[in-house]
């Protein structure tokens, strides 16, 4: 089962968390375990955000088609 289904954040909240993870990885000396955990969480958040964007795009396209 996809971990993105377990994320209970808005798109904006997920994006903020993703940016924080990126900043933490770039600016700190994390252990290898922390890096792996951060990478995994970041990947899940990235996929979640991409799914949200894809769904929004489909809704906009459907609305546009209905208006024609």
Image (cartoon, rainbow, N blue to C red):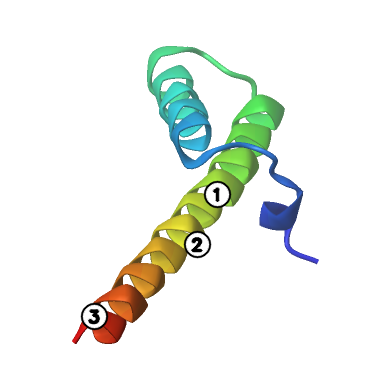
Q: Nearer the viewer, mark 1 or mark 2?
A: 2
Residue found at x 55% / y 45% = 45
Q: Which residue is mark 3?
A: 67
Q: Decide: is 21 above or below 2.
A: above
Q: Which residue is mark 1?
A: 43
Residue found at x 60% / y 49% = 44
Image spot of residue 3 (x, y percent): 73, 54
Q: How many marks?
A: 3
Q: Decide: is 21 above or below 45.
A: above
Which of disc 2 and disc 1 is earlier in sequence? 1
What kind of element bears circle 1? helix
Quadrant of the rendering where the N terminus is positioned: bottom right
Q: 47 or 43: which is nearer to us?
A: 47
Image spot of residue 62 (x, y percent): 35, 80
Q: Are marks 3 and 2 in contact (CB under 8 Å)?
A: no
> In this image, 33 relative to 42: left or right?
right
Tag of residue 59: none
What kind of element bears circle 3? helix
Q: Are marks 1 and 2 in contact (CB under 8 Å)?
A: no
């Amino acid at each position: 089962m996809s971990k993105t289904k377990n994320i209970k954040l808005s798109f904006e909240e997920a994006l903020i968390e993703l940016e924080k993870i990126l900043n933490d990885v770039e600016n700190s000396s994390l252990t290898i375990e922390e890096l792996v955990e951060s990478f995994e969480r970041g990947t899940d958040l990235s996929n979640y955000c991409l799914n949200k964007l894809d769904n929004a795009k489909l809704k906009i396209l459907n609305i546009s088609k209905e208006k024609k």
